[in-house]
Image: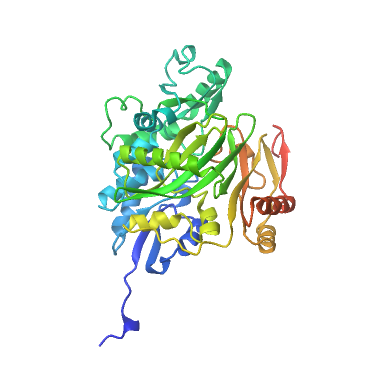
Amino acid sequence: MIRVEEMAVSKKNIFVLAMDDFNQAMLERLRGSEEMVFRPVLDMKTAVDTTEYDMAELLDRARQTLKNFPGTVDAIVGYWDFPTASMLPVLRREWNLRGPSLEATLRCEHKYWARVEERRVAPRQTPSFAGVNPFDESVLDKPPLPYPFWIKPVRAHSSQLGFHVDNRQDFEHAIRQTRDRIHVFAEPFNHILAMAEIPDDIAPVDGWHCIAEEIVSAGVQCTLEGYVLNGEVTIYGVVDSLREGAVGSSFSRYQYPSGMPASIQDIMFEDCQRFMEQTGFDNSPFNIEFFYNEEDGSVWMLEVNTRCSKSHSPLFEMVDGSSNLQAMVDVALGREPNFPPEGGKYQYAAKIMLREHQDGVVERVPDADEVRAIENDMPGCQIQVEAEQGSRLSDMLHQDSYSFEYAVLFVGGDSVEDIDQKADQIKARLDFRFRHGHQEDG
């Protein structure tokens, strides 16, 4: 007779696209993680830390990893934006795994297509928008919307090639930059589009196109985090998004839980549910950004993401006791997310982005020992240094069009004031130094 302790325990094999150390540690802390094995598919340098996305090669490399695995492939998940979010439905379809269809995913990811679907279910919450061909010779003579407006590719990430356009000069700058760099996203995204059934009214607006949108900036922004499981939409958290800069172009902080009025959150929940049902999106986490104008009470639906937000993951872990990666993994396995009923250690948590708005050379960054000392002295603090000593800020990958994010702080506290005090102490001890200007780096 085989003794109980000798019986082999069958663990679920969870394949994670571009798994990094920071998020792997959170995955290992999930409830039920002892019954799972998290296995990487593609490396960070190939799938994230690059500006060259050969989609055919990325998919083939991922397929090879999955085919060569001798055990069962129980789920394929990911928390990064493009291109990994676009690859997930393709790979899941080929391995017959749970997840939204490619078309449902594209109805959310393709910014123009998403706006078309939003307008059908929530016309009053949808800003004015228009498709734009940046290579049209007459594009500058025919602004797609009255000034001012935002313009960005129909698929990109990290606010890249997103521009606030106030006048023709801004429009010329945006079109020039877009023409030079949109190929980074257009070519791989079109590879994905070619694998899907696209409606006739959407097909002409492919990856080489942009979307122009009415500016919605008065008020406060938040993000609903949720999931769809077997057709049922669940929202498990709302995170406030605070911006900085004259045009509110760059995020300065994400804060959880939201201070948004409950009645306004309910309106957003209803809009969110109608939209997800409209798209047919199922069996996956998602997040949707909203704007609330406190002056006139209007609610605007902004961007839709077909994944949980990795930026929010530590915030959920600090406040709820488990990160939103819990929803990502559990839903992929076909079960209700197992969030701890007792919650986490802190009442509030924030991700604080440290930014420079002028290009320059990074003369000094805190070393690992300095960072570790601050984290040890400050409970509920995690620091990520993103800039590299000796590099130029403008050479950093995946920055928006208006600033350079050189470090990130994750801070938990008993109140917002507690977080602010901790953040001020941390920033005072972080010795970053920059040499601004365009002089030679040497």
User: Residue placed farthest to the bottom in the image?
Assistant: 1
Residue 343 lies, in percent from the top left, at: 51, 62
Specify the quadrant of the image occupied by residue 358: top right
Q: Residue visible at 31% across and 70% down?
A: 10
Q: Give whichever of 108, 339 is nearer the camera.
A: 339
Residue 2 lies, in percent from the top left, at: 27, 85
Q: Residue visible at 27% across and 48% down?
A: 93
**Location of residue 331 with respect to 10 vertically, above or below:** above
Q: Give whichever of 38, 368 is nearer the camera.
A: 38
Residue 386 can be seen, yes or no: no
Q: Is residue 95 left or right of residue 308?
A: left
Considering the image in quadrants, where does the C terminus appear? top right
Q: How many marks?
A: 0
Considering the image in quadrants, where does the N terminus appear? bottom left
Q: Is residue 197 left or right of residue 143?
A: left
Q: Is residue 228 left or right of residue 79?
A: left
Q: Give whichever of 41, 31 is nearer the camera.
A: 31
Residue 158 lies, in percent from the top left, at: 51, 39
Residue 142 lies, in percent from the top left, at: 46, 13
Q: Give whichever of 308, 40 is nearer the camera.
A: 308
Q: Residue visible at 44% across and 26% down?
A: 211
